[in-house]
Image: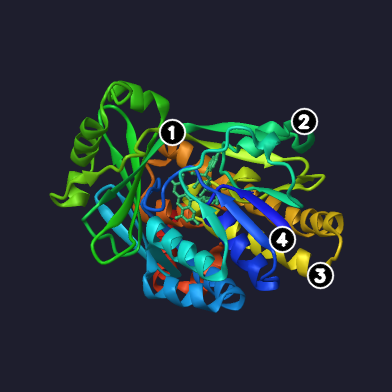
Amino acid sequence: MRISIVGGGPSGLYFAILMKKIDPAHEITIYERDGPLDTFGWGIVFSDQTFSYLEENDRPSYEEITRKCETWDNVVIAHKGQKITVRGNRFSGIGRLAFLNILHERCRDLGVDIRFNTNITDAGALEGYDLLVGTDGANSLVRRTFEEHFQPTLEEARNKYIWLGTRQLFHGLTLTFRQTEAGLFIAHSYKFDKTTSTFIVECGEETWQSAGLDKKSGEETCRYLARVFEADLEGHALLANNFVRWLNFLLVKNRRWSHKNIVLLGDALHTAHFSIGSGTRLALEDSIALARCFRANEKLEDALGEFERTRKPIIDAYQEAAVSSLLMFENAHELMHLDPIDFAYRLMTRSNRIDYEKLKRRDPEFIAAYDRWRGSTTE
Ligand SMILES: Cc1cc2nc3c(=O)[nH]c(=O)nc-3n(C[C@H](O)[C@H](O)[C@H](O)COP(=O)(O)OP(=O)(O)OC[C@H]3O[C@@H](n4cnc5c(N)ncnc54)[C@H](O)[C@@H]3O)c2cc1C
């Protein structure tokens, strides 16, 4: 097959690797707008389950990825000056760039043709391929070009967010809530290598405006937010890369997942709010699912049909959980009066995928403290 992939992010690269493994004779070209050392964002997190998929599907890249990861098993919730730790939540962090570079290398070894610094401006012109894959992210050109067939819905979330880094090492996924005169700021932070942590800040539009963040440069924004989170950063600065800017999370859904020989994967197809940290995982699992459909079906339309039929219910459930999580962060200002332990419990159970019993199995000490608090408030 001749396969053209628009977008060299996690989904495009991993799909290329898997298709080459199915048949080395596939001719695969990836068109990527940026260079091999450019990327937005800092680190990303993966669960253990993601690792087992990566191990099963491509051992060489799995081994490289795990070598570069930092692992922890706790979530820390910082509220009203108290830090509540909840254990039993094993996650690993890795730099997005380090992760992409491992996939680039693996693609090269397998003979995938990656054309960096190639911005596709007319997806309709990519003819002559047996399969065209749109892995070009949340603002996908492939999706926009064929939107009457894919029938996407796009919904902007209310909160503003910015993806920064810092040399302060946050051991564990740390959620910090800081009330200021301008309003509430929330940071999602975790270390992803030996020297750096991701530091994502979100706030409501009103807070953003009253803090004057709409008028501040990247550097001024970093300085302002470093003051808001001064106690948490312990003197460390906030760092911005070339892609730094405030965004609103975009919820992407598509009614149809393919059209003729064109299919979407990853963020082009669906997004999940970063507070459940699963976008890359879902993008990789899409690639695994689609490659499996190609292994099982000779005809292209059968493979694409099976992909949508089997994968869509899983994605729908994930997106639902991610929306519950997003709403909790958007409405967090209404919960600031809560006791830290109650607040932590509500945060941990926000997406309805974790309940009391699961938390009790993962961290009996946390649940014992929660039960003590509940007992003390009802007596
Ligand atoms: C703040 C934030 C934090 C996140 N944290 C996590 C996390 O901790 N864990 C996690 O699993 N996920 C996380 N995600 C989600 C994750 O980044 C995405 O879900 C994931 O990158 C999707 O992969 P993708 O390959 O589908 O798309 P992308 O990674 O968006 O890749 C798309 C690629 O296509 C290229 N491209 C776009 N248009 C064109 C064009 N016209 N021509 C050529 N190339 C083009 C882009 O340059 C890019 O390289 C986070 C996202 C955000 C915004």
Q: Is mark 2 on a helix, strand or loop?
A: helix
Relative to 305, is 326 above or below? above
Q: Is residue 363 visible?
A: no
Q: Estimate the spatial distance between the alpha carbons at disc 4 and disc 1, rounded to whole Å.
A: 30 Å
**Image quarter hosting the C terminus:** bottom left
Mark 3 and mark 2: span between their CA atoms?
A: 29 Å
Between discs 3 and 2, the one toward the N terminus: 2
- Judged left or right of residue 220, residue 357 is right
Query: Image point 27% across, 54% down: which residue?
Result: 82
Q: What residue type is labelled 3?
A: Ala
On the image, numbered disc 4 is attached to which residue?
Answer: 290
| Residue 221 in sight here | yes
For badge 4, the amino acid type reads Leu
- Residue 247 tag number: 1
Mark in front: 2 vs 1 = 2
Q: In which quarter of the image is residue 336?
A: top left
Tell me, for residue 337, which label it has, or none.
none
Judge from the rendering whether residue 226 lies leftward or rightward of residue 182; answer left or right.
left
Residue 148: mark: 2
Q: Which of marks 2 and 1 is nearer the N terminus?
A: 2
Number of marks in the rendered image:
4
Q: How far apart are marks 4 and 2 (CA)?
A: 22 Å
Crowding around mark 2 (Cα neighbors within 10 Å: few <14, some 14 to 19, many 20+) is: few
The front one of 47 and 283 is 283
Along the polypeptide, which appears first: circle 4 or circle 2?
Answer: 2
Please, what is the three-letter code of the amino acid marked with disc 2? Glu
Q: Residue placed farthest to the left in the image?
A: 235
Q: Which of marks 4 and 1 is nearer the N terminus?
A: 1
What mark, if any, has residue 296 been given in the picture? Answer: 3
